[in-house]
Image (cartoon, rainbow, N blue to C red):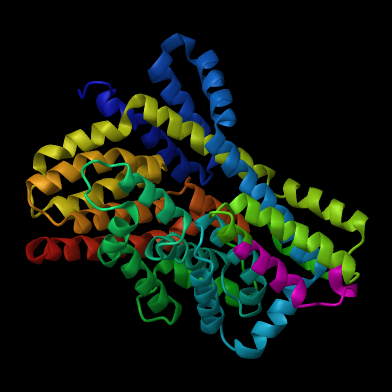
Amino acid sequence: MVEGTYGILSLLPIAVVVISAIITKKVIEPLILGTVVGAVLLYGFSFFQNWVGDLLATMSDPDVVWTMVIPALFGILIAMFGNSNSGTAFRELAIKYVKSKENSLFATYIFGIIIFMDEYMNALLIGGTMRNLTDKFKVPREVLAYVTNATGTPVSVLIPFSSWAVFLMGLYGSSELLKTDGFTTYVSSIPFMIYPIVSLIIVLLFIYNKVPMTQYVKEATKRAEKGNLFPEGSDDAHDMDDESKETDASAKKPRLINFILPIIALVAGTIIFDMDLIIGVIIAIATCFILYRVNGTMTYSELFDTSVKGIQDMVELIVLIVAIFLLVRVNENLGTIEYVIHSVEPIITPLLLPGITLLVVAFLGFTTGNYWGTMGIVLPIILPLAQLSDVNTSLVLGAMVSGGVFGSQVCFFGDAVTLTSASTQVNNMQQIKVSLPYALAGLIISFFIFLGLGLIV
């Protein structure tokens, strides 16, 4: 057993979550069950009071509070767009240029590239905005979720002006083993972020039916063509809710500026205030309040009622976020990441180092939902190995980030999947049924590319 860990038992909560989620097709309940199992391992018979203590500590953690606030604020913004009928104006404009199902997904793909600053912003904004457009062309909601998620984190890491880039630059800058500054190190590793590049290519081919469709996608497409956009088990009230919103808002004149100006405020505010997404969203909401009153779109009463409704729509998501971070805390206390890393360390060779780094980080990201924490733990281990083995550092860092991106895309209880599912109104497991086969194909392709690069770089 690795010192400071619970050995193979540290994987038990993850196994419980995965197995129970597959059986129940739910997410929140398996997550809570996994945290309870972890608490039993950690605390024995006194697990309950300690589990409650960990829950309270999780909810008071600044990072968790930040993650809970983001969807609440985006809930307000999305509700503003819905009640102001501005989404209709955007859709009407897009329909002038979008004439097919494939092009509606391609528009989603391009929009996802434009909103590169943060995968949370991408997940909530793209899904909430584009679903009305793709619905017109009978695109299954879980397919929209896949395209939305597949252009989130991959784009965020490939452009060095995003929340992921800022985090990783800080991580690299704090390492004494790296001789260049964080920005230079990050930029030099971008060409070696193979999985994000492969993922973006695969989803583009998927949009235009240039890759084989899985049986699930074929069935979902047939179902959607009959008018049922939501998979079995989804809340049909979502569709009714969307229609009722449009009916209620039909008296309001669709104004494109009601959509475009808040989006500009969101992006500009986020960038100006050092990539602070919370400030950006608040500025966007304030823009809605001022703009919608000036042009008479909504009354003060409507604005405040809409804000409350937007927060209410995100309550279930916020509960899910708390459960996710509680599981992350349990995994950290059990030493799950350290156990896995030390288990594979003996088999790492110079040739295999980039590929093994990719797989280890991908596995840990998928099983723990803690992508940034995983990379923070893995970095001080792989850097000395790379330098001692004379392996290109940028190549290994690219492999590490690639693994983190994979984990972000396919961890069914992770934040990126959760937020994308919320904005497209499907559950996490339904989204994963579409995305996992293509993500795994991208991971396998990336692994062999890293093997080849290990020989020549």
Q: Residue furthest top?
A: 45
**Residue at (85, 57) in percent of width and height:** 303
Quadrant in which the C terminus is drawn = bottom left
Q: Is residue 255 magenta?
A: yes
Q: Is residue 173 left or right of residue 64?
A: left
Q: Is residue 95 left or right of residue 254?
A: left
Quadrant in which the N terminus is drawn = top left
**Residue at (18, 61) in percent of width and height:** 450
Q: Is residue 29 visible?
A: no
When the figure is inspected, residue 237 is found, relative to residue 369, above or below; the finding is below
Q: Quadrant of residue 39?
A: top left
Pinpoint residue 341: horizontal percent, then vertical percent. 22, 37
When the figure is inspected, residue 119 is found, relative to residue 262, above or below; the finding is above
Q: Is residue 396 left or right of residue 40?
A: left
**Residue at (14, 48) in percent of width and height:** 386
Pinpoint residue 355: horizontal percent, then vertical percent. 18, 55
Pinpoint residue 198: horizontal percent, then vertical percent. 31, 69
State the extent of the magenta-drawn residues as a range: 248-268
Q: Is residue 18 magenta?
A: no
Q: Quadrant of residue 86?
A: bottom right
Q: Is residue 330 left or right of residue 263?
A: left
**324 and 170: which is toward the camera:** 170
Pinpoint residue 258: horizontal percent, then vertical percent. 77, 71
Is most of the magenta stretch helix, strand or loop? helix
**Residue at (49, 65) in percent of width and height:** 116
Q: Is residue 200 visible?
A: yes
**362 and 61: which is toward the camera:** 61
When the figure is inspected, residue 314 is found, relative to residue 339, above or below; the finding is below
Q: How many marks?
A: 0
